[in-house]
Image: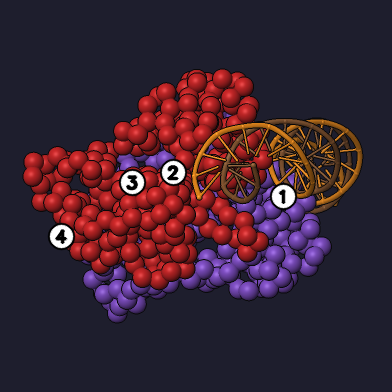
Chain colours: A red, B purple, C brown, D orange
Amino acid sequence: MTGTPRDGSLLARKLCAFVQLSACELECLAGLHAAPIRIPSGGEIVHEGQTGHVVHILQEGWACSFKLLPDGGRQIITFPLPGDCVGLRSVLLRTSDHSFSALTDVVVSRVEASRFLEVFSTFPRLGAALLWAASRDEAMVVEHLVSIGRRSAIERTAHFFLELVERLKMVGLATDEGYACPLNQYVLADALGLSAIHVNRVLRQLRERGLLTVRGRSVQIGDLEGLQRLAGFRTEPFNLQ
Amino acid sequence: MTGTPRDGSLLARKLCAFVQLSACELECLAGLHAAPIRIPSGGEIVHEGQTGHVVHILQEGWACSFKLLPDGGRQIITFPLPGDCVGLRSVLLRTSDHSFSALTDVVVSRVEASRFLEVFSTFPRLGAALLWAASRDEAMVVEHLVSIGRRSAIERTAHFFLELVERLKMVGLATDEGYACPLNQYVLADALGLSAIHVNRVLRQLRERGLLTVRGRSVQIGDLEGLQRLAGFRTEPFNLQ
DNA sequence: CGACGCTTTGACACAACTCAACAACCGTGG
DNA sequence: CCACGGTTGTTGAGTTGTGTCAAAGCGTCG
């Protein structure tokens, strides 16, 4: 153990942006990744209202967290990416307040909430780093709320893809030119608070303006600055303390 | 010190719903409330982008947290009520990511973030209780996101007022019949992602259907169950661990 | 090949926004 | 006491963004 994260632990890599973790702390973190399990595309990771406190650390693949409405509608809250913790909040609340499902085949580590609580008391710095990551996630939800409440369909769509670039770049899964993205227009609609058909129209506009092209399972960015101007996007100072 | 919260510490009252706090812990909490300051209606409590880590504990009055957009639009994220912590997240992030301002005259206690960190290490149970409260707040933001993304204007408005009843009842500021509420239609519009004029029309509909009447600075609930049916509202199981 | 999932397009409906005007309410000052 | 201006609420007419319905085009995979 050298004090740098092992390859493959994207969570460690992300947390190291917050504090330099010691070998012990990294070892502890690695211990949490024991026994990863594979969940096929479409599978449920956590069901809303489910009791029992389990945190999932996403290792590979794309997932989404969402809430269902009585009328069958769905609102996607966020897309956890590799290296993200899923359901950290349910460590403290008794029941999970939203569902998670896998959008692609996914590899996760299941961690009992009690293990997390132990980590907090044994390695406070590591605990703080995990809370820092949770704070960042919450800030993203807030930004999403702003998008849906006050931005037009095209601004909000542009903003969404810009935020994805930033997040994916942090774990080495994107460049300023584009990235692989398995989200179809129905999923985008449920995330952006639009109808799938309108998502299609918006994507066409973005393409025709040369800003962004979504083809198949990949996103190509045509004009980064143009997108940022359209979306009113400024790279968030997710600064460290 | 008896192990029950002193009158006036609504935060203690709220946290006691989570764990029974010891006399020491209550004393520590009371210590955080030292030197309350008054901020006049319309005053800014925290400015977006502001650095420096201060948490505010709201004692009296109404406030809102919001983000501004380049075009001058505003999205209100949440309305902190007496007993709520404001800016807890900025303990870990370097800068505050949204602004807070007072909607009425307000009394707050300013607490240095470092004091909070001390509390976490000295009284872990108290720290857990504070995190529990923060988790609850985050769940509210998520519910707000769902409302704006997937509910119609009238459903979302009904849902909003129902959520307010629940929160205010917890601190003894509402009954099932109604409550005092200083929010005008412009503020409601910025919270609900609507125009002020449309808020007016929606409120008229709610009144004409006998569900809810907003007059002056008070909200009268005409038909609680009808509202819940309209909004698809279920009282959230904000359960304790 | 057909079946399926996803995307694309058009025509139309409707919810919500904008603009403009007016009404009610308030505290203030003459 | 009333006149006043500012803030907040109310209403109507017309516009626009987005949703709905229906259908066709395309890849991919069995």
Q: What amino acid is found at the position of numbered circle 4 in the picture?
A: Thr
B98 left or right of B6 in image: right
Q: Kindly identify the residue that appears in the image at 27 percent across and 65 percent down.
A: A112
- Which label number is shown at residue A122? 4
**Marks 3 and 4, the one that precedes in the sequence:** 3
| Residue occupied by mark 1 | B199
CA–CA distance in space, label 2 to label 4? 29 Å
Residue A107 visible to the viewer: yes
| Disc 3 residue type (three-letter) | Glu
Number of the label disc, if any, that sits on residue A60: 3
How many C-alpha atoms fall within 10 Å of the one at disc 4: few (<14), some, or many (≥20)? few
Residue labelled with disc 2: A140
Who is closer to the viewer here, A86 or B212? A86
Q: Are marks 3 and 2 on the same chain?
A: yes
Q: Which amino acid does label 1 sit on?
A: Val
B105 left or right of A115 in image: right
Nearer-N-terminus badge (3/2)? 3
Picture quadrant where residue B154 is located: bottom right
- What residue do we see at 60% from left, 20% from top? A209
